[in-house]
Amino acid sequence: MSVSALDRATESRQVTTQPCAKINLTLEVLGRRADGYHELRSVVAGVDLRDMLTLAESGAAGIHVECSQSELSNRDNLAARAVARLAARVGIAPEVGLHLHKRIPVAAGLGGGSSDAAAALAGAARLWRLEIGRDELAALGARVGSDVPLFFHLPAAVMEGRGERVRSVRLRWHGWVLLVSAGVPVSTAAVYGAFGATGVGGAPAERHENVLRAATADELNRLAFNELEPAVFRVAPAVGRLHEGLERAGFGPFRVSGAGSTLFRLFDDCLAAQDVAAELNQRGLGTHHVVVEAPVAHGAADL
Ligand code: C5P
């Protein structure tokens, strides 16, 4: 067997991708739907914080998950559920091992589980050599989690509905994001539950458009908003305290990403972002300070 043929054979039995995290630059809640979900409008950007997911033909019946976080090593893992759905859809009896190395914090508003699920769909489609388009994979993914479809449309996208209507957009801005965690997982369902009590917002539509046109981090930091923030602060007071601490100490403006515990601020200058990260670290304001590039593609986009 020639080297290139061997490569192809190896490649066909194993696929590795690096699914990225996302931040919500805007998040508007337009109302509650009859099915209990909330109608949203959100501009999202991929950020260069990545898990690593390998799918391999295992020769053993079923879908087996091995994850660097043991509590995610089970078939409830969104990536495993996504593969199971795709297998059922195309009539394949899966014999697949999923190896997932987590770097994206869980329940942090960064979409890590959904991103892994999107990567798993694209990876399994590649592994099984399926003729299946991105839109069909995204639609399957929507049934696993509301945020899954958006990962098929990065580097940047506008999502609407409960997340099932997504279109790719171009951000004028490109730069660096400082992520700061409050270190507590936040339940998305609990945040939406609390939102009912906080009230529906109603941001002017042009704020989303202005975000797409903004050229500098300062402009974008001013334009970014998240109508779930008060609900996040009610459900997880530690996130509210961290937000207040950052603003009071003059490090702001920081926004909450999604329904999670991660706060972010955008920078044009990577070194400036790293200086702030180091200072926050020293002062003990938040945890897991990382500076990552944005907007970036998903990782499974090239499969
Ligand atoms: O779809 P996903 O499993 O990520 O959603 C988790 C929970 O968040 C849902 O059960 C629902 O309570 C809430 N949710 C919502 N509206 C959305 C997305 C999620 O109410 N657009």
Image (spheres, helix red, strand yellow):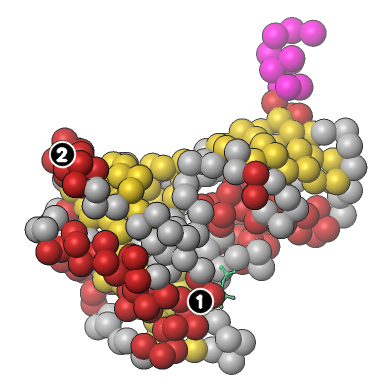
Neighbourhood count class around disc 2 (C-alpha, 10 Å): few under 14, some 14–19, many 20 upward: few
Left or right of 289? Residue 129 is right
Residue 157 vertical placement versus 276 (above, below): below
Rendering coords of residue 25 (x, y %): 31, 63
Q: Secondary structure at mark 1?
A: helix
Task: Say which amino acid is labelled 1.
Answer: Ala
44 falls in the magenta region: no
Image quarter where ligand 1 lies = bottom right
Neighbourhood count class around disc 1 (C-alpha, 10 Å): few under 14, some 14–19, many 20 upward: some
| Farthest-out residue, top | 2
Task: Say which amino acid is labelled 2.
Answer: Asp
Q: Which residues are magenta?
A: 1-10
Which label's residue is closer to the chain start, 2 or 1?
Answer: 1
Viewer-proximal residue among 91 and 78: 78
Rendering coords of residue 166 (x, y %): 48, 66
Task: Give the dominant element type of the magenta stretch: helix, strand or loop.
Answer: helix
Residue 22 vertical placement versus 296 (above, below): below
Q: Which residue is mark 1?
A: 190
